[in-house]
Amino acid sequence: QVQVAESGGGSVQAGGSLRLSCAASGRTFSPYRMAWFRQAPGKEREFVAAIRWSGGSTTYADSVKGRFIISKDDAKKMVYLQMNSRKPEDTAVYSCAVRSNAGWRPSSPYEYGYWGQGTQVTVSS
């Protein structure tokens, strides 16, 4: 069984920065890819960023490219999302997702079998 837990959410003013953390744990578990998604009230879940465990290749949504940075810590099995130049439209519940075997669609939520509970991020103007 794999457990996924996010932390670091909160409220920031527009233009500010915030870093989210995600820890994945489980006996003999090694992720293939980890990603961040977000869901704003009344909207569908949206892909934010993903990172492949081997090699560290990254994928970003156009809406966050150049502002957000996804990174990982192999030893701790943690993924981080550094969010800079925040905008009010970034307000959402951010969830961490984990895929344990090879996949080809990093931006699809159906690729991921394990999810955290989510953490609220609010950006005020």
Image: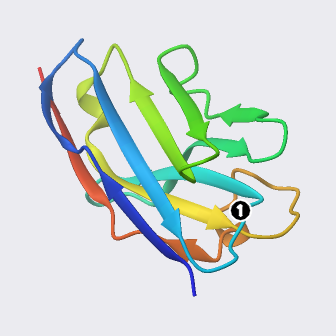
Residues 125 and 112: in front is: 112
Residue 31 relative to residue 14: left or right: right
Residue 43: percent from the left, percent from the top? 37, 57
Residue 81: percent from the left, percent from the top? 45, 35
Residue 24: percent from the left, percent from the top? 52, 64
Q: Residue at x 64, y 45 (%)?
A: 74
Q: Tell me where residue 90 sits by quadrant.
A: top left
Residue 30: percent from the left, percent from the top? 72, 65
Q: Residue at x 74, y 70 (%)?
A: 100
Report the residue marked by disc 1: 31
Residues 100 and 40: in front is: 100
Q: Secondary structure at mark 1?
A: loop
Quadrant of the drawing holding the C terminus:
top left
Residue 2 relative to residue 38: left or right: right
Q: Is residue 33 above or below residue 85?
A: below
Q: Is residue 80 above or below residue 117?
A: above
Q: Is residue 87 above or below residue 122?
A: above
Q: Residue at x 29, y 61 (%)?
A: 42
Quadrant of the drawing holding the N terminus:
bottom right
Amino acid type shown at disc 1: Pro
How many marks overall?
1
Residues 17 and 24: in front is: 24
Q: Tell me where residue 89 sits by quadrant.
A: top left
Q: Residue at x 53, y 50 (%)?
A: 76
